[in-house]
Amino acid sequence: MLDIPSFVVTLAFFLGLQAVGLVILGNGGDLAIRGVLRDMAIKNVPVAVGWIAAVAITVGYAALQLLRHRSQVRRGLAHKPIALVLLQVAVVAAVVLGLTAVLSTNRGRSPAFPIEGVPWVVPIVVVLLLLWTFVLRSTRFGRHLYAIGGNEEAARRAGIKVVRIKIAAFVIGSSMAAVSGLLAAADTGGVSTGDGAGNELLYAVGAAVIGGTSLFGGRGRVIDGVIGGFVIATIPNGLGLLDQGSEINFAVTGVVLLLAASVDAISRRRRSSSGV
């Protein structure tokens, strides 16, 4: 093994695959997206189905949290106060039901063409979020992944197949990047040679850091990346509504990313000093 830093290899393939796109599409070429993939980006879930799913998610989350708390209490394990558990359930319920209520209203400007319901992209993201959260929190693969991120040498001495786990993590990450690329192409209606270029890679890294994922490994959740991506997307949208220029957008994004990285570095330093 050459032990090349993962970020360098990712950057190399990022640049190389752009060359593949130029070969396939040609300079200035594009590829239109049609059919089911396009429909997922522009169509919405029926309002009734959206409300049923929102209620089911809320009830399911509440049941899981309460059952987990009850199990921890019965086994004498460390557990959160019941008031905190109920507060978490209330916050999740407010977010899920509130978002469903907002998206279920008619957002169309013309009464003849109503736009209402949760976009199909939202349940796709939710399913992936739940799937990978379960994998990281409740499977041996997830525990091994955290162990390698925290201390690779200690994980190797504990008998964890470090190389195999890292390869699997890279494959999963690239697969999710491919899914996001398909959804982005479906949203714009096509693929051009300029898609994915520029600052896309840096924004992806920035989204993870802003969400709270540690650059040093061993700490982070799937929801962190979702939150970070939401922040990254909100900054240009909000500044655009305020009629601010691109230079302000880059400056604000850079400051937010620097603050998030600083918080991560300070947190890591405190954990090291405390021996955690």
Image (tube, rainbow, N blue to C red):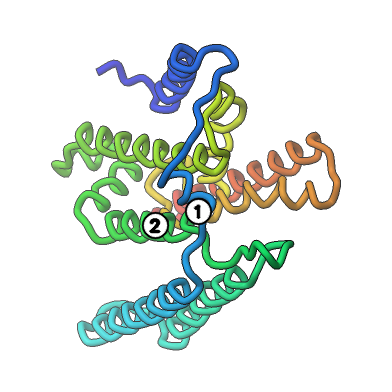
Q: Kindly identify the residue that appears in the image at 36 percent across and 39 percent down.
A: 173
Q: Residue furthest right?
A: 243
| Circle count | 2
Q: Is residue 234 above or below residue 148?
A: below
Q: Secondary structure at mark 1?
A: helix
Q: Residue 200 appears at what percent x and percent y?
A: 57, 33
Instruction: From the image, tell me which residue sits under label 1.
Output: 226
The C terminus: image quadrant: bottom left
Going from the N terminus, do you reach mark 2 or mark 1 first? 2
Q: Is residue 237 left or right of residue 45?
A: right
Q: Kindly identify the residue that appears in the image at 51 percent across and 31 percent down.
A: 32
Q: Is residue 212 above or below residue 99?
A: above
Mark 2 closeness class: few <14, some 14–19, many ≥20 residues within 10 Å:
some
Amino acid at circle 2: Leu
| Residues at marks 2 and 1 touching, judged by CB atoms closer than 8 Å | yes
Q: Name the mark on residue 137.
A: none
Along the line of sight, the residue nearer the viewer: 54 or 142? 54
Mark 1 closeness class: few <14, some 14–19, many ≥20 residues within 10 Å:
some
Q: Residue 220 appears at what percent x and percent y?
A: 43, 52
